[in-house]
Amino acid sequence: MKKVHIQEVLQIAREVIILEAKTLEGLSHSLDESFVDAVDAIRGCTGRIIVTGIGKSATIGRKIVATFNSINIPASFLHAADALHGDLGSLQSEDVVICLSKSGNTAEIKAPHL
């Protein structure tokens, strides 16, 4: 491998890490009481944590469910499209639902019955 190429790759990697760190710092300032409310809802859940989403959000949701289950918090994934077509019956009143959406404008996420 050429030395010039190595330095270029390392520089790009460093720039990405710095950008990600700045982004996370900015995100930390957006936390407010609603974050605490979400934590309290999850901690106080006596049912299951149900995670739902569409597309890439669904993929991330499945990983979140796997993480919850691995730390002994009962969780299930419910695809938002399936929820609109009959699977809402799997929800119980003691469950907590986490809806994931990149834009917040996905029709399935905005549906009134979710």
Image (cartoon, rainbow, N blue to C red):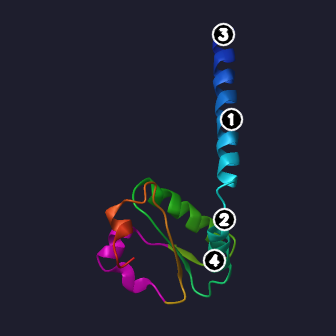
Vertical relation: 62 (above or below) 4: below
Question: Given the image, on which type of amino acid does mark 1 rest?
Answer: Ile
Quadrant of the rendering where the C terminus is positioned: bottom left
Separation of marks 2 and 3 at Cα, in angstroms = 46 Å
Return the residue at label 4: 42
Seen from this angle, which residue lies furthest bottom? 93
Numbered label attached to residue 4: 3
Whichever of callouts 1 and 4 sits on the residue coming sooner in the sequence is 1
75 horizontally vs 113: left or right: right
Question: Given the image, on which type of amino acid does mark 2 rest?
Answer: Asp
Q: Which percent across, then down, holds residue 74? A: 60, 78
User: Is residue 51 visible to the viewer in this orientation of the structure?
Assistant: yes
User: Is residue 2 visible to the viewer in this orientation of the structure?
Assistant: no
Please name the residue shown 33% across and 72% down the image. Answer: 111
Q: Residues within 10 Å of mark 3 (few under 14, many from 20)?
A: few
Let me know if residue 42 is in the magenta part. no
Circle 2 — which element?
Answer: loop
Which segment is the magenta one?
Answer: 77-92
Separation of marks 4 and 2 at Cα, in angstroms = 16 Å
Q: In the image shown, does 81 or 26 lie closer to the viewer?
A: 26
Q: Give the quadrant of residue 28.
A: bottom right
Q: Which percent across, then down, holds residue 9? A: 64, 21
Q: Nearer the viewer, mark 1 or mark 2?
A: 2
Whichever of callouts 4 and 2 sits on the residue coming sooner in the sequence is 2
Separation of marks 1 and 4 at Cα, in angstroms = 31 Å
37 horizontally vs 94: left or right: right
Q: Nearer the viewer, mark 2 or mark 3?
A: 2
Q: Which percent across, then down, holds residue 26? A: 66, 47
Quadrant of the rendering where the N terminus is positioned: top right
Q: Nearer the viewer, mark 1 or mark 3?
A: 1
